Amino acid sequence: MNARPEILTGTEVSTGRRKPSDIVAEYDMKRAALAEANATFEEAGNALKAAATIGGTWGHVTIDTGKMWGDTLERSLLGSAWRHIYELYGLADIASAQDKKRFEQMFAAPPPFTVENIRDQFGDLVMDPWGSILRGLAEVFCDLDPAFKSHEKMKIGVKGLPKRVILSNVSGYGSWGLDRLQNIINALAAYQAKPLVTGLEMALIMENGDALRDGGEAVHPYEARQFAKAQARGNSTSSEPEKTVIPARGIWLKKFANGNGHLFFGPEALRDINRGLADYYGEVLPDCPDERPTKQRTGTAVSKDLQYYPTPIVVVQRIIGSIYGLAGQRVLEPSCGCGRFLDALGAAGADVVGCEVDPVRAAMCEAKGHRVMRINFLETVPTADFDRVVMNPPFYGKHYAKHVRHALRFLKPGGTLTAILPVSARYDHGELDELRPQWSDLPVGSFSESGTNINTTVATIRRPA
């Protein structure tokens, strides 16, 4: 694997870079001085007009020295400060395509320029630049082929990965497929510590699909055509376009008449995609000691609590927000952990019951007023008296299938189960296919804060009436 790029971390400053607090201090100083600077500007304009008149008599010539409004100057200063931080720390080189879109939206209406807000907007990238690069790689590839979503297929040395991806609407300036192509190249470049793709390179690959495979020297296709036309007209004074060195990307594009394209990966590029995604997904630990592998990986992929991946609040809100009519329904949450789903379900008006074997977590839920069965969920006796089950069962292996099948037995006829599962349940295992679940994949990195980067999906299963 390529060496990780050296990027600013925490509040330490590499050579030539200032601390955010120093930049904020400069911003505050200049903002306080804007009114005086504007007044000086207006005074200079008036002095210039006076210099062009005698006794204040108009010479019938309009002299416009301009006028600057205070709010315009403040907007310029604020936008400059935010973009300066973004460029100073090289965040464009490590931010994912989705992060870049988010930042552009933020730049259009930026928050106050404070150290706290800088940390809020850019802190994750600055503190974990390599994690951001890996997440960017996962984001672009997961949208292209289900094989790239699978934790089980994305392991070091696994063969049989897709050697090409299909891009729809790749032809034409500003097309969706062209943007996706650029995002793929940039994500791979960030991982390989290569420069981001340039406009010249994008023009070259659209003109000749093999142009970026091995790199070399090239000129812009438009400039080459203009030079050829000049030569054909006998214009010997026309200078030959300057050549630019482009890096070898190890990719090539085959375009089709319908506007679609197939992007192919050479052996090195495919290896790096595999290793990058394997590094991002890491290992998922089992939920019970007897299934724990003897060799475990350490790092961000492993939760601090080896048997517990709590559901992030944003995921809870997303799922509860998609369920209608919870008020008055009797709902079960197996393995309820610290009670995040219980909290949201109760707030939505549901009559909710949890199940949790860990005494500390069970006590946490009970302290908030929730009813909790203190027992291993797989040892409970099904009652078939719940309208819904909402659950986040273990991610390890295929163990989730036992929990889902057992949970279905708690539902009334016509009841509905909603379960967060590893994406391998949808694309690889087929363990639940006969139950005909409806699937909805969660965004990449939805469980990162809980200690695992594996992709997740939501299965909705209805018990027959």
Image (cartoon, rainbow, N blue to C red):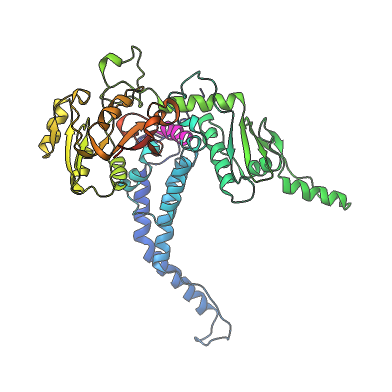
x and y, in percent, of residue 21 in the image: 33, 45
Q: Residue furthest front?
A: 465
Q: Is residue 3 visible?
A: no
Q: Where is residue 161 shown, x and y percent of the image? A: 54, 25
What x and y, as percent, mark residue 77? 42, 57
Bounds of the magenta segment: 127-138
State whether residue 397 is above or below residue 24: above
Of residue 236 and residue 315, the one placed in the foreground of this image is 315
Q: Is residue 329 above or below residue 51?
A: above
353 and 222: which one is in front?
353
The C terminus - image quarter:
top left
204 left or right of 112 in image = right
Tell me residue 445's x, y (percent). Answer: 38, 35
Magenta span contains residue 251: no
Q: Along the line of sight, which residue is nearer the eye, 324 or 118?
A: 324
Residue at left 21%, top 26%? Answer: 377
Query: In the rendered view, does 166 fall on the left or right side of 38?
Result: right
State the residue lying farthest toward the top. 294
